[in-house]
Amino acid sequence: MSTLRFEALKEIFNRKPVKIEEPARRSELFGTNVFNEASMKQYLTKEAYENVMEAIKTGKKIDRRVSDHISTGMKEWAIAKGATHYTHWFQPLTGATAEKHDAFFETQGDGTAIEKFGGGALVQQEPDASSFPSGGIRNTFEARGYTAWDPTSPAFLWGTTLCIPTIFVSYTGEALDFKTPLLRALQSVDQAATSVAKYFDKNVSKVTATLGWEQEYFLIDSALAATRPDLTLAGRTLLGHSPAKGQQLDDHYFGSIPSRVLAYMRDLEIECMKLGIPVKTRHNEVAPNQFELAPIFEEGNLAVDHNSLIMDIMSKIAEKHHFKVILHEKPFAGINGSGKHNNWSLSTDTGTNLLAPGTTPMKNLQFLTFFINILKAVHDNEELLRAGIASASNDHRLGANEAPPAIISAFIGSQLTEVLDELEKVTDGKLSPKEKTELKLNVVGKIPEILLDNTDRNRTSSFAFTGNKFEFRAVGSTANCGNPMTILNSILAKQLIEFKTEVDALIKGEKMKKDDAIFNVLREYIKQSKNIRFEGDGYGEAWEKEAKKRGLSNNRTTPQALKALVSEKTRSLFKDLKVMNKIELEARHEIQLEDYAMRIQIEGRILGDIARNHVIPTAVRYQNILIENVEGLKHIYNEDFKKHSNEQLEIIEEISAHIAKINSGVKAMIEARKVANKIEDAEKRAFAYCDDVKPYFDEIRYHCDKLELVVDDELWPLTKYRELLFTR
């Protein structure tokens, strides 16, 4: 292994940036491999085009009569671009994307062949669902599932395959993917937000939830990554001593992008342009060899599809550049992990961002209405939001190295806090003309001024307002955005429905004017949601004590956090909105618990293997060298040899002590795994892995890392942090 490490290092120094050819204008490439409106106009009949566009804009089902026309046009477009196969592209609950390729090619009875793709193949297929997680939804004899075309997310070409975004449901109709609940949640928030927006603009007929994700990732040379079994199998380093220099000097953040990395980024961006993914920003992140890319905001469903797609193509493009993309939330100890900030807002079909203050008091009252309702929704559902970002990998990141803690809180800034404090003083009942004028001119009217140049600098907040959007920062870098976005849009939909009910009751029952009713309800919401607002540092015992006093949860581990997913409150929320039923929620709960236990199990096996088969033998080999040295000194100096070999003897004893601790730790971990594996209940097994198996990881790692500092560098088999993080 040590030979492999040094061979890999030698190989890296011969690497050259891959030459990338790109057009002068990227706009010319944008969407060229997407079956978008322009392509549909060219390849579809007028009736087929209008059917698809109506489905996209209103959600109306596509007429089966024209599905053959649509599939024919789509096939001709794809074949003209070199496609030979098609696939229903979906997002099962594995966290990865899935696809099964079928050729357009079909034989005829007379020995000839044609290219065929019918409407039935476009609209629906029946892949075998038996190997995908189902959480007990399906029986063995009901193994098949159904994929159904989602026309709101355009088909695209990847390589020689036409990819058709689809939902994925079980034989009995329950959702087995991330897309289906998301589409339902987006529809719910559209209806609820449109009803509230009509208070301020009668012309609003649709509200769209928008999303702009920021994808953080590490790039490690593929040769170096191949020398690390933990990086290869678990996506993170399970041991490794911190280098002398990490991110202390802040010299990587926004620094000059290394040449090989820049070539990779350019190559990736070109493919993104072709696929209609509007990537705009690229830069070095805080940790060494950590980077970020971010697109322009898009409609929520399309943005989720694009993020799922880009996580896949990032790795494929990286192979060409001899890189391995590391998406794990915490691949390296002691430095920043990777998140996926979800920048979320709401836009009307009249062109208004509902989270952006306007030029008039009425527009600002609209802004405050949605802003305060969001805070209320987050306050009332903070445990569910925590469950939405829970995973074995994200548990490592939350609360460490600038990442938000497991406690969900909202940061809104001191100026908006003052605005809410003023609104909290609103008179109960009808407002006097003087008070209403004062509110509109000096409180509501001045919002655009106070937000001018007011950027958010609290990086430890999990849910922060950043001027015209909320940024959900606690989402992990490996996560499918569909999960947290389903929850976020659902809790807001429920909250807006309740808000409208309360406002309408005041208008009708007490003959209040609309503005008075809105101010009265918002005042109460400000009081009720006050505990979720936090402007301070999200780290340390002080905030944990304060959060506990406020009644906020601190679910540090995934098994604990996931309890909120199957609470009666959550079931009622999703049932009322028709986003997920009880069976779907319980299935997701079980799938996530099983995923957690399996990941800890896999990491435990990898760590045991590396510790016993790589670290201990290397330490013993070095110890033998020292013993030979001591024996030689004894031969030369006889009785005085200890005076000349005291340091060597100390190191020999130190190595023995660390080996003993590693070996006993691995043995105890294996026994704890055996006990956990016998537990049939998914939740109890996940807790056993969390509480009884995982704690051994740190103990074993500590002694392995200490040996790394003692053993001769030329013998050490595992590529070190200084090489993984600083070799470019």
Image: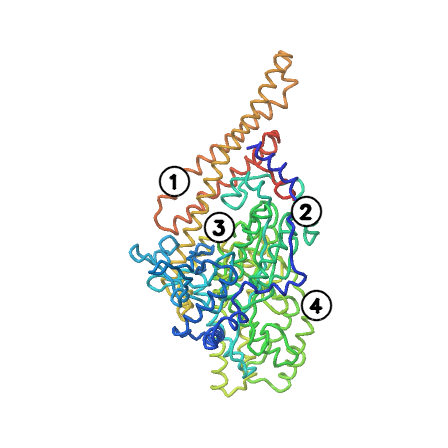
Q: Which residue is mark 3?
A: 392
- Give the residue at the far left of this rendering: 141
State the colouring used for the structure image: rainbow
Sequence-wise, which precedes: disc 3 or disc 2? 2
Say which quarter of the image contains residue 673.
top left
Sequence-wise, which precedes: disc 2 or disc 4? 2
- The x, y position of residue 230, in whole percent, is 52, 41
- Residue 379 in view here: no
Q: Which residue is mark 1?
A: 674
- Density class for disc 2 (Cα within 10 Å; few <14, some 14-19, many ≥20) is few
- Rounded to the nearest angstrom, the CA distance separating label 2 from label 4 is 29 Å
Q: Which residue is mark 4?
A: 453
Are the residues at dot 2 and dot 1 in contact (C-beta closer than 8 Å)? no
**Vertical order, 209 against 385 (above or below):** below
- The x, y position of residue 24, in whole percent, is 68, 61
- Rounded to the nearest angstrom, the CA distance separating label 2 from label 1 is 41 Å
Q: Residue at x 60, y 26 (%)?
A: 651
Image quadrant where one finds the C terminus: top right
- Rounded to the nearest angstrom, the CA distance separating label 4 from label 1 is 57 Å
- Amino acid type indicated by mark 4: Asp
Say which quarter of the image contains residue 110.
bottom left
Q: Which residue is mark 2?
A: 248
